[in-house]
Image (spheres, rainbow, N blue to C red):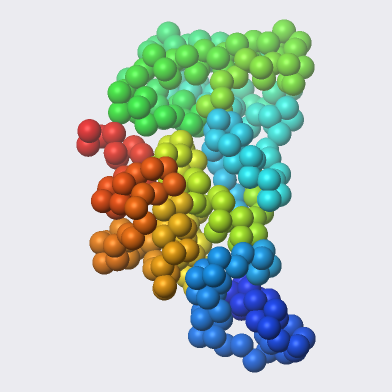
Amino acid sequence: MYMDRAPEIIAGSAKLTLSVKPINDILGSMDESEACKWVLELFRRGHGSPFEHGVYSFEITCSRVTSHQIVRHRIASYTQLSQRRGDKLLREVVREACRYLGIEYPGKPGSRSTYMAYVDILGKILDHDPPWDKLLEITCRGFIIPPMVYHGRDKGFLRELIRSLMEYYRALANGYHPEDARYLLPQSVKTRLYVTMNTRELVENFLPLRMCSHAQWEIRYIAWSLWRQLVKIHPQIFRYTGPRCILYENRVRREPCTLEDYISGEKQFTIERCPELVPREQIRSCLEHASSDPWKILSTQ
């Protein structure tokens, strides 16, 4: 979800600071080319407040590891899947295990005996010891699997995730309340977030911090995926955004440049080093690394 006219609204609010005309009159006479000029000028001057009038909402599926990082961005609104009230994503692990074993899925939990049936099914999976690909297919239904586990084909890691889920359902079968049983779940368990951020938070904080190669791999992957969608929606704004090196570079240049310009080498960095202390001559390769799929990066090393 997003404001269709976000670039014009941002540009119009910037023009309002220099005009006595009402905002409706300003927006009524503003075309796309003028809006682009004003947005570019905002980047040049580091004038951030007009960006706060553009709003974007998006859904994220991630691990609890990453959801805790995302909600540290305070200028945003969040609604998250309840781990206490709903375990549908975790039950997908049981459902996929039933498919592999060729047995009937017990259905939604309605009693302690159903939870115990989940325990038995997951125990059978561990006893059968499926091949790597099948075990991965089962486990990733409810958990986020790190790239190192994926490329190392670490079955032991996946088995521990399933074992933790067994203990979670065993606790529920023994009468534990869900808010207590969930203490047994690892942080890789999947969750969902619905997030609303204004453009300034995206441009000046979330994208610069989380697209950087120094960000944790999962939140970096999310940030780059989000950026690619935002560029498609409103290129007038987001083509000038990127990791912190892009934000810093575009603040000192006479004319801001796009992220693609820097990655392709068409434009060169002028800053001596980025905020993470990467020297100028290494920033481009750092950008290439940051933009790569974390699973593919490890497969080529």
Of the pair 171 and 290, the residue shown nearer to us: 290
Percent position (x, y) of residue 208?
49, 51
6 on left or right of 295: right
**In this orientation, does residue 23 appear?**
yes
Check the image and report above or below for 290 versus 134: below
Residue that sits furthest to the front in the current view = 272
**In this orientation, does residue 89 appear?**
no
- Look at the image and tell me in which quarter the C terminus lies: top left
The image quadrant that residue 73 belongs to is top right
Q: Residue at x 45, y 43 (%)?
A: 220
Check the image and report above or below for 197 versus 142: below
The image quadrant that residue 252 belongs to is bottom left
Check the image and report above or below for 116 versus 254: above
Of the pair 68 and 160, the residue shown nearer to us: 68
Q: Residue at x 45, y 26 (%)?
A: 138
290 on left or right of 4: left
Residue that sits furthest to the left in the current view = 300
Residue that sits furthest to the bottom in the current view = 29
- Look at the image and tell me in which quarter the N terminus lies: bottom right
284 on left or right of 87: left
Q: Residue at x 50, y 74 (%)?
A: 40
Percent position (x, y) of residue 289?
31, 45
Q: Residue at x 65, y 59 (%)?
A: 198
Percent position (x, y) of residue 242?
45, 56
Of the pair 215 and 295, the residue shown nearer to us: 215
The image quadrant that residue 45 belongs to is bottom right
Number of numbered discs on residues: 0
Percent position (x, y) of residue 296?
29, 40
67 on left or right of 257: right
